[in-house]
Image: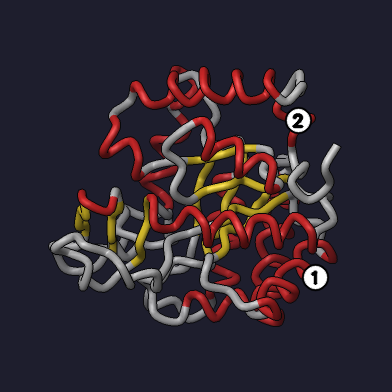
Amino acid sequence: GTITLRPQAGNPKPRLFRLASDRAVINRMGFNNKGLDSAAIRLAKRNKVPGIVAANIGPNRDSQDAPADCAQCARTLAPLADFLVVNVSSPNTPGLREMQNAKPLDELVQAVLGARDESGWPTPVVVKIAPDLDPSGCEAIARVVLDRSVDGLVVSNTSTGLRDGLTGTNAGEAGGLSGAPLFALSTQVLADMYRLTEGRLTLIGVGGISSGADAYAKIRAGASLTELYTALVYNGPGLIQRIHNELAALLKKDGFSSVGEAVGTASHPQ
């Protein structure tokens, strides 16, 4: 989920729908959360819990100054998270995806990076983008994140398209689609962003991963890290170990001694 400056109830329920026959989920959560102060209190206690924790931040639905609101979130959470994710791509907050355009994205990124610096913590900042971008949109994002020295991108959020061919009874619900149907599109956008950013940024590959082969495809498209959610709904937590085992075998088969060696090799074959 995404943390906003002020508490937010989210969209009316029901707002999460399984499409089991498609191995997919549609959600329209709407940034439901208890706000920055509550999240900061919980994150301050996380030293007792091992692992890497990212803090997703975004503007409230009724925000009058999204850059300022996100900056405050970044200033507060930078000391408490391992990296910050600026979410400008949820389809469930009206107008949010317009912040992927060059001018508003540049203003937002400047505000967040400035607040991060003010915090005194060198916490990496990445931007989470949509899969439903045209080539000019991808190019605009690449220019901004390179010019402003953003640390990386999360590619990608859920899709508002890809409904053709779905068979689940909830296929007509409004919201963002995740899971298997998103894999091809999100992987293509990932490869495009790897090329446009010249391999200079950390890319996190997200969208439809349910096997080691899927994770490997994201890595070869340019991802240094991968993320999954929907597949856990259908496969359970044992999926993680299976992906690790399958990925290790694929890397070995192709002669790679580490994930890092395989990053982006679909664009630049070894």
Residue 40 found in image quarter: top left
Tell me the kind of residue under disc 1. Answer: Arg
The image's colour scheme reads secondary structure
Q: Is residue 114 left or right of residue 157?
A: right
Question: Which residue is at 39% across, 50% downward?
Answer: 180
Question: Which residue is at 39% across, 35% downward?
Answer: 42
In the rendered image, the vertical position of residue 133 relative to residue 204, given as above or below: below
Q: Nearer the viewer, mark 2 or mark 1?
A: 2
Q: Which mark is residue 143?
A: 1
Tell me the kind of residue under disc 2. Answer: Gly
Helix, strand or loop at label 1? It is helix
The x and y percentages for residue 8 are: 30, 63
Q: Is residue 6 or residue 168 the one in the foreground? A: 168
Q: CA distance from mark 2 to mark 1?
A: 24 Å
Q: Is residue 268 or residue 195 the one in the foreground? A: 268
Q: Is residue 15 left or right of residue 29?
A: left
Question: Which residue is at 43% across, 52% downward?
Answer: 36
Q: Earlier in the sequence, mark 2 or mark 1?
A: 1
Q: Is residue 65 or residue 11 the one in the foreground? A: 11
Q: Which mark is residue 260?
A: 2
